[in-house]
Image (cartoon, grey):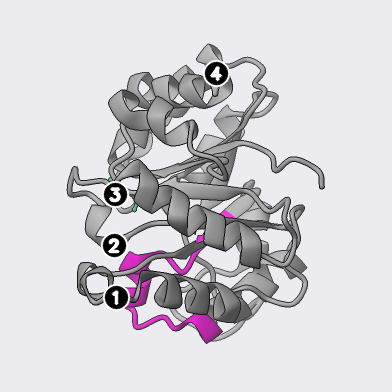
Amino acid sequence: MNAPRKLAAGNWKMNGLRADVQEARKLAAEFPSSAVDIVLCPPATLIGAMAASLIGSAVRVGGQDCHVAASGAHTGDISAAMLSDAGAHHVILGHSERRADHDETSVLVAQKARAAHDAGLVAIICVGETEAQRDAGQTLDVVLGQLTDSLPERASATNTVVAYEPVWAIGTGRTPTLEQIAEVHDALRANVPDRAIPLLYGGSVKPANAAQIFAIPNVDGALVGGASLKASDFGAIVAALGAA
Ligand code: 13P
């Protein structure tokens, strides 16, 4: 098989004002070219400005969600075509915060991924178990169930990335053991429809733990929250991925 591409993706969540676009410019200056793919996903309000400031750089921009429809009467929502038009190349879908806050199901996530693919976007589809599910020994059932139901039929290495984000590791400073990450990533690799689909780990990735996480087989990169907000931190994570 072709080796999966390596990707460092930053999820700014609901953080960032116009002044923070300079962090993206700093990152781009640090990596004028890059052996690994780099994507920043700011809030929708900053996508246009960030994309404009990154023209000609190695850093790409992504959205954090999209609607299933291309346009229409959906107040407050944003379509995949709009993200693309604003300069986005990727879109995060099915993040656990959206599954929890907005009752998003895997079936809906697959519909959104179809819409993203129709608009030419790469879908970063998130899966992950809660702490209660892990404690109950359900991790692989939950994660593989989400994978099966969230990926659309056309999912391939050119249009899809899968991010494993244990819910209990997000924003907590806690990470699974390297063996626990390896177990899930091995299972994901065995079950993705195209074995070259990049598999990201997400949940409290920091400069201090990035290198050991990137050394795990079947980990092709990271989806980073808090540590993606500053170019100094995220740049160190990008460098660790490049060196892995
Ligand atoms: P943290 O890196 O802040 O734990 O967030 C992870 C995440 O949810 C990325 O999508």
Farthest residue in the right direction? Answer: 1
Q: Is residue 80 above or below residue 175?
A: below
Q: Position of residue 55 (x, y in %)?
A: 66, 29
Q: Which residue is mark 4?
A: 243
Identified by mark 2, the residue type is Val
Label 1 environment density (alpha carbons within 10 Å; few <14, some 14–19, many ≥20): few
Of badges 1 and 3, nearer the viewer stands: 3
Q: Secondary structure at mark 4?
A: helix
Q: CA distance from mark 4 to mark 3?
A: 22 Å
Q: CA distance from mark 2 to mark 4?
A: 28 Å
- Lower sequence index among marks 2 and 4: 2
Q: Residue beneath label 1, please?
A: 100
Helix or strand or loop: what does disc 1 sit on? helix
Q: Quadrant of residue 159?
A: bottom right
Mark 2 or mark 1: name the one nearer the start of the chain.
1
Ligand 1 within 8 Å of disc 2? The answer is no
The disc at residue 167 is 2
Question: Could you tell me which residue is drawn at 67 percent across and 73 percent down?
Answer: 115
Cβ atoms under marks 4 and 3 closer than 8 Å: no
Residue 19 visible? The answer is: no
